[in-house]
């Protein structure tokens, strides 16, 4: 299937991380111009997604080099493994994690959506996580659910413009995912599994999908919601 991504310019913020690398590779395999961005970029552009000025400078660099921006992926956030389990309900950790993930997504989306709506085309995808569907980890739940809720609000605000905004919620991501799916747990997935879904959502073929939260890896077994 031709996804129609040849020549499309896609910025992948967090493009040197586990998921970001897989997304960049998949996009390039589809013929897209995938531009990875991170604070310490070995290639692509240097961008601190927590800083408005750095975001603006990075976007200007993309536009200067390519003349357009067709899509944005935001996967820049500290790994869940860096969070302190002993502080899952600590307001300071919750706030820091919310800022680093949900507000980073919102900052970047707000920076690109005006241009996309003006041109009548654009795709924005935020990486959330299946902790959004579970209790027991307030930090993980809040930061991931906030990405989903922000994406839905932005999707509704841009409805009918040719722009879509969606969230993708991976389970535990592993290069060698287990096939087991225990009750009350999600099924594991690989970076390539996540990249496949993200790549489709970035394509012109996905224009009828917006405001969605799509789980990758078996959605938490025995749980409904969001």
Image: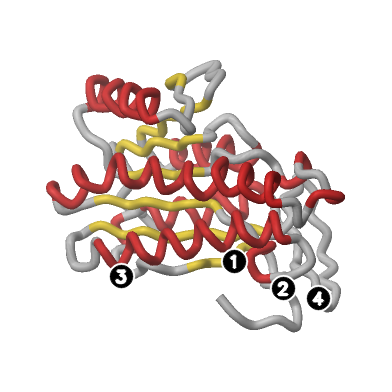
129 vs 106, nearest the viewer: 106
Cα separation, mark 1 vs mark 4, equals 15 Å
**Where is residue 42, by image quadrant?**
top right
Q: Which mark is residue 205?
A: none
From the top left corner, tell me how far across and down residue 123 is, in percent.
Answer: 33, 52
Q: At numbered mark 3, what does the secondary structure look like: helix, strand or loop?
A: loop
Determine which residue is flagged by label 1. Answer: 215
- CA distance separating discs 3 and 2: 26 Å
Placement of 64 over or under 173, stated as above or below: above
For the residues bearing labels 2 and 4, Cβ distance under 8 angstroms: yes
Looking at the image, residue 142 sits to the left or right of residue 26; the answer is right
Looking at the image, is 170 positioned above or below residue 79?
below
Toward the front, the furthest residue is 91
Name the residue: 70% across, 81% down.
223
Residue under pointer 2:
220
Q: Are marks 2 and 1 in contact (CB under 8 Å)?
A: yes
**Residue that mark 4 sits on:** 184
Left-right relation of 64 to 219 = left
In the rendered structure, which disc, 3 or 1, sits on the residue that comes first in sequence?
A: 3
Residue 137 placement: quadrant: bottom right
Q: Which residue is mark 3?
A: 208
Q: Earlier in the sequence, mark 3 or mark 2?
A: 3
Residue 181, position as x, y percentages in the image: 81, 71
- Of the pair 107 and 22, the residue shown nearer to us: 107
Nearer the observer: mark 1 or 4; the answer is 4
């Amino acid at each position: 299937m031709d996804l129609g991504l040849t020549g499309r310019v896609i910025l992948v913020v967090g493009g040197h991380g586990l998921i970001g690398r897989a997304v960049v590779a998949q996009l390039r395999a589809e013929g897209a111009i995938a531009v990875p961005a991170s604070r310490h970029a070995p290639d692509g552009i240097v961008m601190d997604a927590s800083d408005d000025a750095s975001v603006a400078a990075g976007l200007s660099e993309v536009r200067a080099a390519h003349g357009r921006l067709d899509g944005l992926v935001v996967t820049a956030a500290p790994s869940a493994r860096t969070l302190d389990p002993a502080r899952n309900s600590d307001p300071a950790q919750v706030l820091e994690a919310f800022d680093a993930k949900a507000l980073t997504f919102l900052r970047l989306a707000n920076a690109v959506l005006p241009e996309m709506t003006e041109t009548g085309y654009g795709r924005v995808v935020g990486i959330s996580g299946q902790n959004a569907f579970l209790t027991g980890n307030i930090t993980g739940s809040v930061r991931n659910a906030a990405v989903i809720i922000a994406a839905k609000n932005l999707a509704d605000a841009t409805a009918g413009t040719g722009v879509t905004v969606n969230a993708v919620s991976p389970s535990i991501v592993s290069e060698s995912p287990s096939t087991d799916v225990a009750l009350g747990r999600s099924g594991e997935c690989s970076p390539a599994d996540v990249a496949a879904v993200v790549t489709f959502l970035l394509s012109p073929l996905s224009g009828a999908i917006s405001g969605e939260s799509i789980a990758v890896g078996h959605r938490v077994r025995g749980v409904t919601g969001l």
